[in-house]
Amino acid sequence: MNKLVKLTVVACLFLTTGGRCAQDKIHRIDQLPQLRQEPQHETVSKRITSRFLHSHYRQFDLDDTFSSQIFDRYLNMLDYSHNVLLASDIAHFAAKKTEIGNELKSGQLDTPYALFNLAQKRRFERYQYALSLLDKPMVFTTNDSIDLDRAKAPWPTSEAELNKLWDAKVKFEQLNLKLSGKTDREIKDTLNKRYHSVLKRIVQSNSEDVFQLIANAFAREIDPHTSYLSPRNTEQFNTEMSLSLEGIGAVLQMDEDDYTLINSIVPGGPAAKSKSIVIGDRIVGIAQGNNPMVDVVGWRLDDVVALIKGPKGTKVRLDILPAAKGSKHKTVTLIRERIRLEDRAVKVSIKTVDKKQVAVFDIPGFYVGLTEDVKVQLQKLATKNIQSIVIDLRGNGGGALSEAVSLSGLFIPSGPVVQIRDNNGKIREDSDTNDRIDYTGPLVVLIDRYSASASEIFAAALQDYQRAVIVGEPTFGKGTVQQYRSLNRMYDPLLRPEWPILGSVQYTIQKFYRVNGGSTQRKGVKPDIVMPTVSDSEETGESLEDNALPWDSIPAATYAKVDNLHPLIAALIKEHAARIAVDAEFQNIKQDIARYNALKDKKNIVSLNYDQRVKENQNDDAISLTRLNEHFKRQGKKPLKSLTDLPKDYQAPDPYLDESVRIALDLAYFDNKNVNNNEIKN
């Protein structure tokens, strides 16, 4: 997912129902507006530039080199797949690349607007061509294929070369619809509406769309977590922060192919609870309750959001094209809910293995009040015969830094938890000042690639203090702090009463460091016990971003380790390896890893042959059905005849949590034995 150069238009799915159907037919290219910047954009550009130059953590100059990099990022945001613009179009603007910095400083954004207008014209032409292909017979018997990742491909040199790319694109979309069960007539009607929706969206583009794009090309060239929010997106951001949200609990954005992409999932929301939606999935259709599905590919993002919004308790069905390339459509039904951050509290469950109990703390986010909630749960557990505790931080994207510090304090004596350096080089320590330790027993922390920010601070602190064994996979690697600032000034309404409310910026101001001195930036936290996983570290995480701030280190803080777990970890790894070697679920994971590695170099190449795609889908379904029935057999349940027979309340196994519980019991065993280094080695 992170390989996509994403339009920085964030939309949270909440509040009331609505939405308009973007299907009016647009045929004439002369309807395209020639967009120009609005009067307020000059001032906004100057304010953004000044703020980033003087206050951002990264020290940079808007010189020719940086200007060229902004231009290239802007160009790729306009045409990520390199299938809209021609090489000659790019060459026409080559001389302007080094001028972008000066234009941002002066607020005279002639080049970005001219390039945007040209890109819109070319995009309009492409979709007119796509519409012309719908009258031709559909042929899926050849051995053609499509490359779904052309980010590094050269721009086409001729219209004929462009046409060839779009022949494949249209055929790919036709085949996807055919595989979903649509008739030829339905395929043509769906794509006809879809492409006209894109044309309508192109015609509806406005000046703020252009400004938002160039401002974010600038912001994202500085670092991945710096951004400009338009007035509308600022309002949506403030709504999100109000903690009174209704919807499916997901954040959307447009990808480069006019699909609505799941960018992130709110823990505890309907999307997360469904376990049927993952980051990177694309929403291609929406239906209210049992009403017909409406195709939304090519719609403006705010129209898609309006259609997904709805009152608490109402049903919405989503037609999902899974993140995995070439996967078939699936329909996911969700019940909208009111989502409040304070409702996303820690959940505690007890896992029993061989009559021994382990408490699992599922922490979806570092909300204000988390530490007190955990403390209450620890007090409740004090009267129970708990052997060990697992803290599950998978998918936890962070939250309040203060909670990461205070939560660490429940498990360690007083001392520093994290070091923070600002853009002036000043370093401060955030410390736990309470000598009280609320839990002194065996502790395991489970992390994954989506554990980020505050999660990484907590896991790193417990690892550095040798207080807990960290298991799972390396974390995301977000080791920076952002600040949100409005671009409005108190005097604006007096001096410029005709101006609309201006937007805002979010930018990086600080960097996190572990107490051992190493940054969590890029590298994240590496587990003491790494579990096998199909996810590729090269495709997820901060290190994937080409402009992420670098990893570095500062002097270690003064702290005293609670224990020496290194010799114990060697013994734990031995037990862990022996278990997963014969565990059925981990054997499935091992097979998935082998399949992924075998296809890794071709993962973005998808066949356009109907029979081959059907065979691939049937093979995938057969593997899934076999694994489900093996799982049911182990539970003493009857096998399924097909995947459609899967009960709606089916809970998939969680081998990573199950193994973490076993590791926690091993840790308790070694702690109780008080094994010294020699005994462990033997």
Image: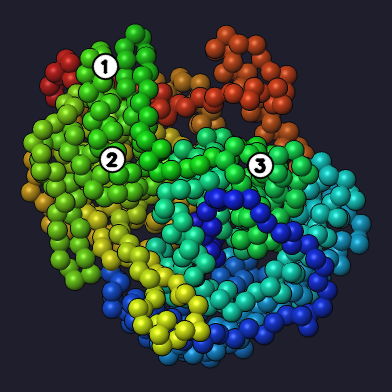
**Is the C-beta separation of discs 2 and 3 under 8 Å?**
no
**N-term-proximal mark, 2 vs 1:** 2
Q: Secondary structure at mark 2?
A: loop
Question: For mark 3, does the 10 Å Cα neighbourhood hold few (<14), some (14 to 19), or many (20 or more) residues?
Answer: many
- Where residue 277 appears, x then y in whole percent? 58, 41
Mark pair 2, 3: CA separation: 32 Å
**Amino acid tagged 2:** Gly
**Amino acid tagged 3:** Val
Q: Classify residue 199 by image quadrant.
A: bottom right
Question: For mark 1, does the 10 Å Cα neighbourhood hold few (<14), some (14 to 19), or many (20 or more) residues?
Answer: some
Badge nearest the viewer, 2 or 1: 2
- Where residue 533 appears, x then y in whole percent? 46, 37
Q: Which residue is mark 1?
A: 386
- Residue at 69%, 18% (x, y): give it: 640
Q: Which residue is mark 3?
A: 316
- Where residue 408 appears, x then y in whole percent? 21, 39
Q: Which residue is mark 2?
A: 369
Task: Decide: is 520 above or below 374.
Answer: below
Question: For mark 2, does the 10 Å Cα neighbourhood hold few (<14), some (14 to 19), or many (20 or more) residues?
Answer: some
Q: Which one is in front, 620 or 319?
A: 319
**N-term-proximal mark, 1 vs 3:** 3
Mark pair 1, 3: CA separation: 42 Å
Task: Decide: is 79 above or below 6.
Answer: below
**Amino acid tagged 1:** Ile
Task: Decide: is 98 above or below 209.
Answer: below
- Residue at 81%, 71% (x, y): give it: 26
**N-term-proximal mark, 2 vs 3:** 3
Q: Which mark is residue 474?
A: none
